[in-house]
């Protein structure tokens, strides 16, 4: 622990450089100015760890400007130094959608029969399906929407229901605007904010579709999907 003061200063310098790069400022910019810039830019990574970062800054100032016989008045703990290094790594390499949520996306066509989708749900346990009309993304079918459709048509004969097309189910979905497409390099912090905002709006079944090239022009452009069930994974990787 005798060298922890120097180790702390080294780790702080690494943090300083990481913050400067994150907000696109020169590395010799005053640290307080860097935090001010991050605040103006609403940088979500730095906002998340602002209290820790500001504490490191205040401790650095205290240790470098107040000494007893040219020695630091205190020695930072191993735990504190390791924590600061971890925060620095979060700032430098914060995870994005493609790091965590790339997966095969099962899509369906609006002309597909509902009974075929139900069989797929039974066998594969999927609950959300992007719906296409040719190569155009036109909506998402959910298990909730399917259940509502069946409940609304419970008095119809079985043959009629078997002939139902997915486009008919789309018409009874209460919330057809409960998904959006995001680029695969979307920050995990932005993903969390998107979900939290939609939850506040009451859209608890909101779905994010991950696009390879920022937009969906064909089915193959969908490379992942994020559902509310993935929120614990989002939070754990902040």
Image (tube, rainbow, N blue to C red):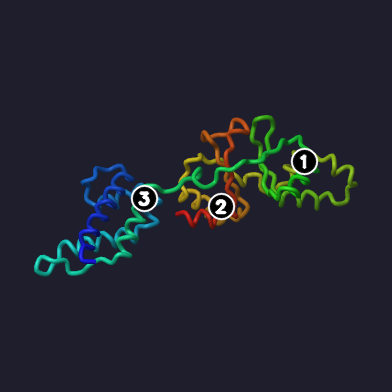
**Mark linked to residue 91:** 3
Q: How many numbered discs sit on the rendered protein? A: 3
Q: Position of residue 64 (x, y in %)?
A: 17, 61
Do the numbered discs 3 and 1 sit on residues whose CB atoms are within 8 Å?
Answer: no
Query: Does residue 174 appear in this view?
Result: no
Picture residue at 27% right of the left edge, 55% below the top = 11
Q: Which quarter of the figure has residue 104?
A: top right
Q: Earlier in the sequence, mark 3 or mark 2?
A: 3
Give the residue number, with chain letter if any, for mark 2: 198
Q: Position of residue 171 (x, y in %)?
A: 73, 42
Q: Is residue 237 left or right of residue 24?
A: right
Q: CA distance from mark 3 to mark 1?
A: 47 Å
Q: Earlier in the sequence, mark 3 or mark 1?
A: 3
Determine crowd level at label 1: few under 14, some 14-19, many 20+ residues with C-alpha closer than 10 A: some
Residue lying farthest front? 2
Q: CA distance from mark 3 to mark 2?
A: 26 Å
Q: Position of residue 10 (x, y in %)?
A: 23, 54
- Judging from the image, what secondary structure is the residue with disc 2 in? helix
Determine crowd level at label 2: few under 14, some 14-19, many 20+ residues with C-alpha closer than 10 A: some
Give the residue number, with chain letter if any, for mark 1: 168
**Mark linked to residue 229:** none
Quadrant of the drawing holding the C terminus: bottom left
Q: Is residue 164 left or right of residue 221?
A: right
Q: Position of residue 66 (x, y in %)?
A: 15, 66
Name above or below for residue 42 compared with residue 7.
above
Picture residue at 57% right of the left edge, 39% below the top = 223
- Judging from the image, what secondary structure is the residue with disc 3 in? helix
- Judging from the image, what secondary structure is the residue with disc 1 in? helix
Picture residue at 49% right of the left edge, 52% below the top = 193
């Amino acid at each position: 622990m005798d060298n922890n003061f120097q180790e702390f200063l080294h780790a702080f310098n690494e943090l300083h450089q990481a913050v400067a790069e994150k907000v696109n400022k020169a590395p010799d910019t005053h640290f307080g100015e860097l935090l001010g810039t991050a605040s103006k830019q609403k940088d979500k990574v730095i906002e998340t760890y602002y209290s820790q970062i500001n504490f490191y800054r205040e401790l650095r100032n205290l240790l470098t400007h107040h000494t007893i016989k040219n020695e630091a008045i205190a020695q930072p703990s191993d735990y504190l130094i390791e924590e600061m290094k971890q925060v620095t790594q979060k700032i430098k390499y914060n995870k994005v959608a493609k790091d965590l949520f790339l997966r095969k996306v099962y899509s369906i066509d609006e002309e597909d029969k509902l009974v075929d989708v139900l069989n797929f749900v039974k066998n594969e346990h999927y609950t959300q399906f992007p719906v296409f009309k040719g190569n155009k993304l036109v909506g998402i079918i959910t298990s909730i929407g399917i259940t509502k459709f069946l409940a609304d048509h419970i008095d119809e004969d079985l043959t009629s229901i078997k002939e139902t097309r997915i486009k008919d189910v789309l018409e009874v979905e209460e919330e057809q605007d409960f998904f959006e497409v995001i680029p695969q390099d979307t920050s995990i912090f932005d993903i969390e904010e998107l979900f939290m905002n939609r939850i506040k709006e009451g859209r608890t079944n909101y779905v994010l579709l991950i696009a390879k090239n920022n937009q969906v022009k064909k089915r193959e452009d969908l490379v992942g999907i994020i559902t509310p069930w993935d929120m614990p994974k989002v939070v754990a990787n902040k």
